[in-house]
Each structure stands twice: as C-alpha cells, then as structure tokens.
Amino acid sequence: MTVRLVPLVPRSIRTPGALRALPRSIRARLTTIATLAAAAVFTTGAVLALADPRRALLWTSLGAPLVLLAVGGLTWSAVRSALRPVERIRSELAEITGQDLSRRVTVPDTGDEIAGLAVTTNHTLDRLERSAETQRRFVADASHELRSPISALRAQLEVAGSYPDETDWPVTCARALAAADRLTCIIDELLMLAKLDAGAVTRRRVVDLCGVAEDQVRRREGARVPVHLRLSGPAPVLGSPVQLDRLLTNLLDNATRHAATRIDVSVAVRGNEVVVTVTDDGDGIAPQDRERVFERFTRLESARAKDSGGSGLGLPLSREIAVAHGGTLTAADHRPGARFVAVLPLHTA
C-alpha cells in the first residue's frame, strides 16, 4: 500500500517570495515550527508504513490533521508574539501629538525589519520635531520683526493725531511711508521664503545674470556707495527672473549697509557654472559668523549698531533662492570687508 504524506506547510508560505516578505523574526519561527512538524510527521509516517500499512493509513487520515491543527495553533501564537512589537509601535505612535513630538517609539531587540521600522520611525519623528521647532521659532521671530515697524507707525500716527497743529506733516508722512516700506519688504521676503519652504515650482526661463546685474547697478546710480561692475560675457541661467533679481537685490542691499567707499560686483562663467560675487570694503564678517548670517532673523551686533533697518531675512532668502536653483551661496574670506559668492549652474542650449 502506498502511503501519501500530507504537506505540512501551506504552498503560500513555502514560496520563497512569500517568506521573504515576512520579517526575519517571523520567518525564523515559522521555519522552525514547519521543520519540526514535517520531521515528526514524516518520521512517524515512515515508521508506521514499515511496521503496519494500516496504521500508516490511520495516521495519515487522523494523526496528520491533528498535527496540522497543532502546527496552526503554534504558528498563530508565534506570529502573534512576533507582531507584538508592531502593535506596541502603533499604540505609541497613536499617543504622539503635534503638541509633544519629543516622544519616541520603543525599538525591539529582534534585529529584523520590525526593529528597522521602529528606528526609521524615530528618525522621522526627529525630523518632524526639528521642523516644528524651526516653524515655531520662525513664527515668533516674524511676529517680533513685524511688531517693531507697526509699533513705530502707530506711535507716529497717534502723536500726529493728538497734536495736529504742531505736527510736521511732510516729515510724519515720510516716516510713515518708510515704516510701511519696511513692512512691505519684510512681508514680501516672508512670502517668498514660505513658497521656497513649501517647494512651490515657479515658472522658469533663461535669465542672463549679466543683464540682471546691469539693471541692479543702473537702479543704484547716485547711491551713497558706488557700485563697480565687472562682466565676462553672457551668463545664462535657467531660473525665476523675480527670484534671481531678489538674490542680487538682497546681496547689494547688505553690501550697501556695510560698505565704506565702494562695492564690487562681478559675473563670470567658469566651466559649467556662473559665479556671482558681491564685495564691500566694510568691517567684514568674522569667520565664526559666516554661517550664522544665513540663519533667519539673525543680525550680528556690528550690523545692529551700524544700521537698524535690516530684517535679518535678506541673506537667508538669497541662500534659499540659490539652493532652489541648484546652486550655493557662501561668505568667502576677504580683507577688508566681506565677500559673498553665489554659484549657479550654467544653462546650455
């Protein structure tokens, strides 16, 4: 009599692809259970087949299903135990809210994909916490910067309204317009930063940075500090004309506030890059502060003492624009004064 052994492991689990889809801890437990059960059934069936074919048939019809039932129970228990860390991660994630992003999920010591999931989840929470903290600090700094010109404008108008006959209205209007202009500048920079942070895609076209630099110098004719321009031919860049113009505007505004006698601007093509440098002969920037100046709302003490009109957004916005166009903006070593170098990809037809 031929004895037919019933396969213990379902076909879906015996498939290598299906096994690979399971975490290592579950695969190890299932493999161990299936191996032990298959060995027990095969050995018992073989012994009974050699001793008594009838007993072998009885074993196949009754004993093997009981073993399969036991294997199913063990498998369910093993999988439930192996997936318990997943349930723990889920419950801990459900308790994390936007008001408290400091909590982290427990990383199991299984060393498998579930542990990797917990580690990745914690890294994601780290990034979310840093982003939320940056956003809160940004809102607080923006509120502070907006409050100053608004308070100044309100005070001027209140004084003028209380003493209308003693008010020099042309001077008052000029001061009010200056405060309004500062408010407009801060709001425009905040809106552009928000768009860049959100990854908004602006319409881009080929822009000649030499032409942008020439327009900037032309608009600054007769200013307190003369701007000297040096060009080396066409410098096409694929980008947003408004944002690239803002980049140069902020760099030149910063140089104008700090320069003593002159500002030098150069646009050159070097290999596959367009290099724009803006140099002033002012007090310069200490090496330890050359990255700090690109932090939002950061103004060095020397800048606050010399000029109170800045917002601390110009240089950070210029760097964001350069990065959004695939380039960089850095503060280079220069004596005397400061030098900012913007490097952007050259557009080739």
Image (spheres, helix red, strand yellow):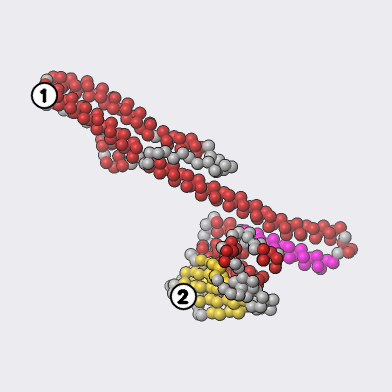
Membership of 68 in magenta stretch: no
Q: Is residue 8 left or right of residue 48?
A: right
Q: Which residue is mark 2?
A: 270
For the point 53% across and 67% down, the residue is 329
Q: Which residue is mark 1?
A: 50
Membership of 173 in magenta stretch: yes
Q: Is residue 186 left or right of residue 348?
A: right
Where are the magenta residues, as a range? Answer: 168-191
Q: Where residue 16 sits: x, y (%)? A: 27, 41
Q: Quadrant of the C terminus?
A: bottom left
Question: Considering the numbered disc 1 on the image, is that residue within a helix, a strand or a loop?
Answer: helix
Choose between 138 and 298: the one closer to the eye. 298
- In the rendered view, would you say 324 is above or below 115? below
Choose between 5 and 290: the one closer to the eye. 290
Going by the numbered disc 2, the residue's amino acid type is Arg
For the point 24% across and 29% down, the residue is 37
Q: Where residue 285 sits: x, y (%)? A: 60, 68
